[in-house]
Every structure is written in C-alpha cells, then in structure tokens.
Amino acid sequence: MSATTVWITLANKDRLEGLKRHPKESYNDVIGRLLDMAVDEEPLSEEAIRGIEEALEDIKAGRLYSEDDIKKEFGVEE
C-alpha cells in the first residue's frame, strides 16, 4: 500500500478525531467512511426528480400549507 501525506488544519484534524469510532481507529478509516457516505449508490429516479420539481413549483407558486394548517385539518393537537 502506498501512502500520501495530506495537509489539513488542526481544526479539521480535531473534527476527524471526533469522528473516530474508537481511539485507535486510523484517520484513513474515518476518511474512508466519510467518502462512502458522500457517494450515493442509488441516484434519484426520474419519478423522484419529477416529484421534487413539482414540489418546487408549488412552493414558488405559494401552494403550500403551514404545519398549523395541517394539524388543524387532521385534528392533531400538541
């Protein structure tokens, strides 16, 4: 395995330290986990994208309900 030195700020090093699952976990393992989380193996379907686009159009047109409106409509009390 080859190694590469990477410069990071002390603040980011501290953040990586805080993400360790156990004290002896390597930064390489922490960074690998973060990279795995950043890559979406299941891209959105065309249907999901259309639904998001429609929702954004509704928001822009003012077609939305407040949380209070929805609670009243469904008889939900806090």
Image (tube, rainbow, N blue to C red):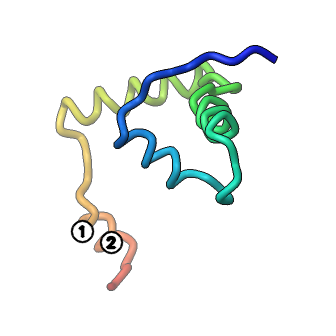
Q: Is residue 6 above or below residue 58?
A: above
Q: Is residue 76 left or right of residue 47?
A: left
Q: Is residue 75 above or below residue 14?
A: below
In this rendered view, identify the residue nearer to me: 58 or 35: 35
- The numbered mark at residue 71 is 2
Answer with the quarter of the image where residue 36 lies.
top right
User: Around disc 1, counting alpha carbons within 10 Å, would you say few (fewer than 14), some (14 to 19), or many (20 or more)?
Assistant: few
Q: Is residue 52 left or right of residue 63?
A: right
Q: Residue 60 in the image: x percent, y percent?
A: 20, 30
Considering every residue shown, the one lying at the far right of the view is 1
Contact between marks 1 and 2 (CB within 8 A): the answer is: yes
Q: Is residue 35 left or right of residue 13?
A: right
Answer with the quarter of the image where residue 38 lies.
top right
In this rendered view, identify the residue nearer to me: 30 or 76: 30
| Residue at image mark 1 | 68
What is the spatial separation of the Cα atoms under label 1 and label 2, in whole angstroms? 5 Å
Q: Residue at x 60, y 24 (%)?
A: 44
Q: Residue at x 60, y 34 (%)?
A: 31
Q: Residue 21 in the image: x percent, y percent?
A: 66, 57
Q: Is residue 5 above or below residue 25?
A: above
Amino acid of disc 1 = Asp
Q: Residue 30 in the image: x percent, y percent?
A: 63, 41
Amino acid of disc 2 = Lys
Q: Is residue 73 above or below residue 21?
A: below
Name the element at disc 1. helix
Q: Residue at x 56, y 19 (%)?
A: 5
Quarter the C terminus occupies: bottom left
- The numbered mark at residue 7 is none
Answer with the quarter of the image where residue 32 lies.
top right
Q: Residue at x 39, y 72 (%)?
A: 74
User: Around disc 2, counting alpha carbons within 10 Å, would you say few (fewer than 14), some (14 to 19), or many (20 or more)?
Assistant: few
Considering every residue shown, the one lying at the far bottom of the view is 78
